[in-house]
Image: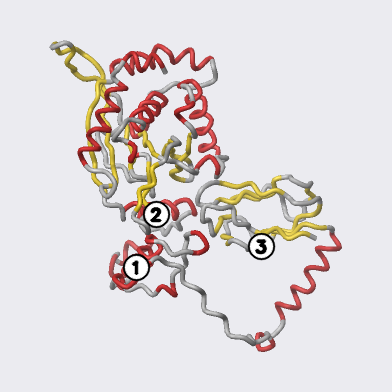
Amino acid sequence: MKEIKFVDVGEGITEGHIQKWLVKDGDTVKEDQSIVQVETDKAVVNVPAPIDGIVKIAAPEGSTVYVGGMVAYIGTADELAKAEKPQAKAAAKPAAEAPKATAKAEPKEILAAPSIRKLARDLGVDLKTVTGTGPAGRILENDIRNIAHEVSIQSRPVPKFSEVLEERHQEQIERVPMSVTRKTIAKNMEASWTIPRAVHMDIMDATELFNIVQKEKPKVLQLGGKLTYLPFIMKAVVAALKEDGNERFNASFDHEKFEIIVKRYYNIGLAAEGPDGLKVVVVKDVDKKSVVQLAKELKELGDKVKNQTITLEEMRDSTFTITNIGSLGGGFLSVPMINYPEVAILGIHMVKDAAVVKDGKVVAGKILPFSLSFDHRIVDGAEAVHFGNSLIKYLEDPEFLDML
């Protein structure tokens, strides 16, 4: 008989939600057959059967499982029957007969930099109560701030529910438990809010960009892609990131060592809305791919988000993120939340009809507003303006667009 447990799939994932069983209790399955879908805070993972046998479900649909927790058993009918008997006996055994601990647990070593220890003292956080999320359990700044935030919330006086809503409304409300994805979004937004950010906003002439997208859209469709403004914007972003003075927008901040980690690879994260919440899919090595390749890949990733088949590998290792607000059909300017621990995020808005000036004359054209949220610890406002001007330069240049 084989036990199937929820294993550590990386990226700091500690729990999963049993979204859907693909087999029934007692079904016979084959090795490597997908038997259950588990939703983590990053993606929906299909768990395969490790051997041939009969399935005994241990975690029902809708339940939460933690790393190391039992999901199911697989074995022969005899093996499953024998396994159930000892479990029944163990459940009936009085608690008083449980073996007592014979040795005192060794205190765990606290791995934390001096700056983190000082931060803990300043915020009144006991390091012994903190679980580190860094390498080898090292305690990071965000671990301290999360604990301090929770303690702050718990210490606030919370009025009773009956005091918040009048009696006649209590039957007209619904408490909705947060999904694993929504919990993660909440945690990520709290982490993002700790970044001292500023926002640079501007508008570019998108007439040439509009024209080339309309012209090439049918050709790309025949090649299996869906051409939008996004592949051109991604290429322009990478070109801007490679310019002298803009490198630190493609970076992250190591708070422990007070170092800026500048990245010489260009993986663009893209915020995508799925049925279970917001996901950030990642297109790797954008500088090495053509506009047509990017259009195809974006379509494939978008379909996976909608079908909830996106993998962890397709959502990790981004260096700079774009959120395409315009694709939702509204908005003029916004303040996007930085995808922690990156340095910046670019918000792209709707391409709109507008009067633009060409050769000293006002003519009908297209404009594209954008917002650049950035970590003010790493880059300054002048650098954000320089990056925005670089982006405008490439996207307004017909020769650059034709080369892509």
Crowdedness near tag 1: few (<14), some (14–19) or many (≥20) residues, C-alpha within 10 Å: some
Provide residue 12's location: percent of width, then percent of height.
Answer: 51, 56
Residue position for label 2? 186
Q: Nearer the viewer, residue 72 or 317?
A: 317
Quadrant of the frame with the C terminus: top left
Q: Which residue is mark 3?
A: 70
Helix, strand or loop under label 1: helix
Residue depicted at 31% across the width and 15% down the height = 208
Circle 1 residue: 148
Element assignment for label 3: strand
The amino acid marked with disc number 3 is Met
Q: Amino acid at mark 2?
A: Ala
Q: Residue at x 20, y 38 (%)?
A: 382
In the picture, residue 71 is in which quadrant?
bottom right
Is 360 placed left or right of 171 in the picture?
left
Report the Cα–Cα distance between label 1 and label 2.
16 Å
